Image (cartoon, helix red, strand yellow):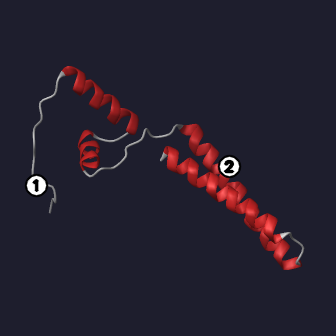
Amino acid sequence: MRQRIIRIQVRLSDIEYKKLLDDTTRSKETISSYIRKLILGAQLKEKPDYEFYEVMKQLSRIGVNLNQIAHVANRINDIDKDFYNQQAKEWHELSRKIKSKYL
């Protein structure tokens, strides 16, 4: 059963309609989805390009490498744990900021 049963019509000027189309194209949302998200107070952002996702893959690989290094270092008990933890914390914070800005 369809949840959205109320249909509305809105009249827009040429300028308003062009802006709506530009915004939905940049955000890669449908018009309906875009308007619903605006009504609910979502902060809509332009979807990042291909390069962003490549950078995120690289960050993910670095994170995996950090985890592997930590695992081996803990096993042989030869690591500056405070330094490693600080570096890992900074990496996670950078990753979170990038995602927050672009997604």
Q: Is residue 10 left or right of residue 87?
A: left
Mark number displayed over residue 5: 1
Q: Position of residue 81 (x, y in %)?
A: 81, 71
Identify the residue at image location x=57%, y=54%: 96
Secondary structure of the residue carrying tag 1 is: loop
Identify the residue at image location x=23%, y=26%: 16
Q: Position of residue 3 (x, y in %)?
A: 16, 60
Q: Find out whether the residues at labels 1 and 2 contact each other: C-beta distance under 8 Å.
A: no
Vertical relation: 19 (above or below) 92: above
Circle 1 crowding by C-alpha within 10 Å: few under 14, some 14–19, many from 20: few
Looking at the rendered image, the quarter that the N terminus falls into is bottom left
Q: Is residue 54 left or right of residue 35?
A: right
Identify the residue at image location x=33%, y=49%: 42
Q: Nearer the viewer, residue 57 or 43?
A: 43
Mark number displayed over residue 48: none
Vertical relation: 78 (above or below) 101: below
Q: Residue furthest top?
A: 14
Vertical relation: 70 (above or below) 37: below
Which of the 4 image quarters holds residue 44?
top left
Vertical relation: 46 (above or below) 66: above
Q: Earlier in the sequence, mark 1 or mark 2?
A: 1
Secondary structure of the residue carrying tag 2 is: helix
Q: Nearer the viewer, residue 83 or 62?
A: 83
What amino acid is at disc 2?
Gln
For the residues marked 1 and 2, what is the alpha-carbon distance in whole angstroms?
A: 44 Å
Q: Position of residue 34 (x, y in %)?
A: 29, 43
What amino acid is at disc 1?
Ile
Q: Position of residue 48 (x, y in %)?
A: 50, 39
Q: Is residue 72 left or right of residue 103?
A: right
Q: Nearer the viewer, residue 5 or 70?
A: 70
Name the residue carrying label 2.
58
